[in-house]
């Protein structure tokens, strides 16, 4: 069966993957997910981007919030706050079940890969969800006030500190999780997509795992990124803010430059003025409000990949 591989982060990436599984046989879709956002909180191993994708693919995602589970309740957080516990990072009562089980599984020797497969199977997810690595990689944001661990920067400080750099602690020692290199290099892989996730915070950690960049370069399938830029801004999150802080224009050209040498094509939003991106491109409306939008973006990205080949 032909396969499509997606490199993805949080909510924006999950929307694209949902579009793909509604366009193609879901068993032919493999997502390689950022784990640079993972951290230990209250003794629990939290893996936000993996969970966002799992919840999205099994129809349990909290769509209004953009993370966590639907039909959530917050008794645990209320009790925690009453006791003076840390309230800056919210773990919903239902969401908690996943973190507790994952922490227990990892403590008894299971890998993040194995645990993720178990949950995906339990929830009837036919797509393959692969954490980028079983080894710990921690995204850290350098600021004038010192380095901030990802969730401290993202949630506690609401991305407000000015970033001067980004590091992926542990990445140099990390190995790709089982299936990652195989999926990228598989001769049956029709296309490799880079989701419209934050290039600096969500995609770069994946690319920092030794072997993944080289596998993309050697792949027989074309690599197409979907730009997260719409109307001169990022759809969500700190992408545009980081670009400004790194002295780069908030534009598709910056995205194309960031992925230069890695991608064969870039899917951009149709509102953008036509400019030379230095790479093949196609355009569509890349805002993904509903399932039809997600399917359209998935179809357009695949269409560009099919047109380009390798
Ligand atoms: N994001 C927030 O803005 N506030 C939170 O309290 C929060 C809790 C949380 C709990 C579990 C989980 O899987 C994700 C959670 N997120 C929260 C989202 C998370 O910080 C980000 O979505 C990703 O790390 C960025 O992709």
Image (cartoon, helix red, strand yellow):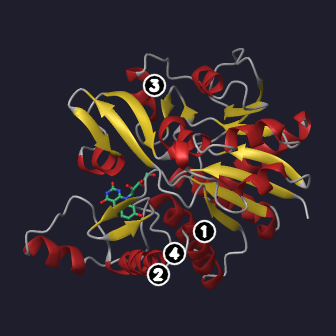
Q: Earlier in the sequence, mark 3 or mark 4?
A: 4
Which callout, 2 or 4, points to the residue nearer the camera? 2
Q: Residue beneath label 4, please?
A: 60
Q: Determine the residue positioned at 24% across, 50% down.
A: 156
Q: Earlier in the sequence, mark 2 or mark 4?
A: 4
- The local crowd at label 3, few if under 14, some if 14 to 19, many if 20 or more residues have their Cα within 10 Å, is some
- The local crowd at label 1, few if under 14, some if 14 to 19, many if 20 or more residues have their Cα within 10 Å, is some
Does the beta carbon of the residue at mark 2 sit less than 8 Å from ligand 1? no
Q: Secondary structure at mark 4?
A: loop
Q: Determine the residue positioned at 91% across, 52% down.
A: 187
Residue 66 at x, y percent in the picture: 44, 58
State the separation of the CA atoms marked 3 and 1. Answer: 32 Å
Q: Residue beneath label 1, please?
A: 113
Which callout, 3 or 1, points to the residue nearer the camera? 1
Q: Is residue 197 visible?
A: no
Viewed as shown, does residue 77 lie left or right of 239? left
Q: Residue beneath label 3, please?
A: 243
On residue 108, which mark appears? 2
């Amino acid at each position: 069966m032909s396969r499509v591989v997606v490199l993805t982060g949080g909510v924006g990436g999950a929307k694209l993957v949902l579009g793909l599984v509604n366009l193609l046989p879901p068993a032919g879709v493999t997502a390689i997910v950022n784990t640079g956002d993972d951290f230990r909180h209250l003794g629990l191993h939290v893996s936000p981007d993996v969970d966002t994708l799992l919840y999205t693919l099994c129809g349990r995602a909290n769509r209004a919030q953009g993370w966590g589970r639907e039909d959530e309740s917050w008794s645990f957080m209320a009790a925690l706050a009453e006791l003076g516990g840390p309230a800056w990072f919210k773990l919903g009562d239902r969401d908690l079940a996943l973190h507790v089980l994952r922490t227990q599984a990892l403590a008894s020797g299971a890998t993040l890969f194995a645990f993720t497969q178990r949950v995906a199977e339990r929830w009837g997810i036919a797509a393959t969800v692969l954490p980028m690595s079983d080894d710990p990689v921690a995204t850290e944001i350098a600021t004038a006030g010192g380095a901030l661990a990802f969730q401290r920067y993202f949630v506690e400080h609401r991305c407000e500190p000015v970033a001067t750099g980004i590091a992926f602690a542990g990445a140099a020692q990390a190995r790709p999780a089982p299936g990652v290199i195989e999926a990228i290099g598989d001769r049956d892989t029709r296309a490799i997509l880079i989701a419209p996730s934050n290039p600096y915070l969500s995609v770069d950690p994946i690319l920092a795992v030794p072997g993944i960049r080289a596998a993309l370069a050697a792949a027989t399938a074309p690599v197409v990124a979907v730009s997260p830029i719409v109307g001169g801004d990022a759809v969500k999150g700190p992408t545009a803010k980081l670009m400004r802080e790194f002295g780069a224009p908030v534009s598709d050209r910056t995205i194309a430059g960031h992925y230069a040498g890695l991608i064969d094509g870039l899917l951009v939003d149709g509102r953008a003025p036509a400019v030379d991106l230095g790479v093949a491109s196609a355009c569509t409306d890349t805002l993904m409000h509903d399932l039809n939008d997600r399917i359209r973006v998935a179809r357009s990205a695949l269409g560009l990949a099919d047109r380009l080949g390798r």
